[in-house]
Amino acid sequence: MMRPVAKGLISIIRAFSNPNVAGILRLQTQWNSPSAFQNIRPLSMSLWPFSAQPRDFSLPNASWSPEMRRVYDHYIALCEVETIGGEKKTGPWRKLPSYNRTLKYAKGGTYLSKMIQSKARLFTRSIKEHGAAFEYVIFVNKQEKRCVCVFQAGRLLEGPPGHVHGGAIATMIDTVMGGLAACLSGPIMTANLNISYRSPITLGSVVLIHSALDHVEGRKTFLTCRVTSTDETKLHTEATALFVSINVGHLFGT
Ligand SMILES: CCCCCCCCCCCCCCCC(=O)SCCNC(=O)CCNC(=O)[C@H](O)C(C)(C)COP(=O)(O)OP(=O)(O)OC[C@H]1O[C@@H](n2cnc3c(N)ncnc32)[C@H](O)[C@@H]1OP(=O)(O)O
């Protein structure tokens, strides 16, 4: 029996001898237009021999410490509530799935840049080794317009000896606040981010990143953020941010 990888390689070779692929390559001149991508996406996806099912990176894995798992279980329990009749229904919290791609296709005018784009990965999910860098899961409470992220900082995020790099903390704050702003206001980009580092975070430890809506003014969504120990007694970092709503065409230069 033929192994799946061999089958996959044969499908790729067949795909490149397929006249439809020449059509795809001709479309490269139109690749600045998102609608052109929408047209070719189903074809190119059908040529891909491996699973198109995206992996949710925010599910428990073996690198999670007991503390990470304990806090995760706490919030997962809040995602579903039991009615008086014993029926289960959606609770106030929702776990956000987390994939390693944002938009499948982004701006770029040449075939080469499309090849680079196809390898683009979300920064916080670009390291495959479990537990080495950013292990996190975000829970959103849309009614209360706030979220909590459970974050375990891996060994590759070292800044000061034994502690987490300030840029890695800023990355997580931007990710969490940006995720909440996107849930509340749709497509956004970070316009301004102010951070105060109050106490260092030990490498390998688990912290909570709380973010909440402050107010909305037209296209501007203002949020606050606090990074604390899991028992919330210790404050590590505070931040405020402004996210501006964008038309997705902003990312395509249209
Ligand atoms: C599509 C994606 C969806 C999300 C999917 C989620 C899934 C994945 C999860 C990962 C989540 C990662 C989340 C990371 C999010 C980034 O990290 S985004 C990357 C970093 N940010 C950037 O590169 C943004 C660069 N800046 C820009 O592109 C543009 O300046 C902006 C921010 C879009 C604003 O430009 P604009 O649309 O032309 O707006 P503009 O008219 O200049 O300003 C609008 C208003 O904002 C004010 N404003 C603008 N900039 C500033 C500023 N810096 N300070 C103060 N006020 C400002 C203006 O004064 C104006 O105010 P009003 O006059 O209306 O009162």
Image: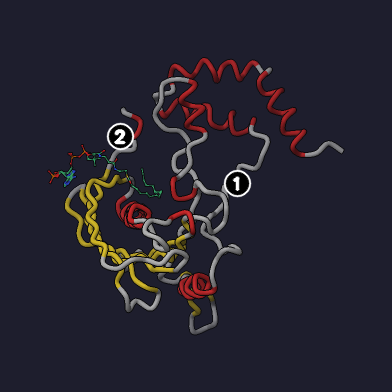
- Residue position marked by numbered label 1 in the rendering: 53
Element marked by disc 1: loop
Label 2 belongs to which residue?
A: 250
Q: Residue at x 37, y 73 (%)?
A: 229
The tag on residue 198 is none
Along the line of sight, the residue nearer the viewer: 222 or 227: 227
What is the quadrant of the C terminus in the image? top left
At a point 23% along the width and 61% down the height, the residue shown is 196
If the picture is divided into quarters, which one holds ligand 1?
top left
Q: Label 2 to label 1, Cα distance in Å?
A: 28 Å
Q: Is mark 2 within 8 Å of ligand 1?
A: yes
- Estimate the x, y position of residue 99 in percent, counting from the top left: 50, 49
Q: Is residue 204 above or below residue 218?
A: below
Under mark 2, the amino acid is His
Q: In the figure, 156 relative to 4: above or below? A: below
Asked whether, in this view, residue 179 is left or right of residue 132, the answer is left
Q: Quadrant of residue 248?
A: top left
Colour approach in the figure? secondary structure
Front in this rendered view, residue 225 or 32: 225
Amino acid identity at mark 1? Gln
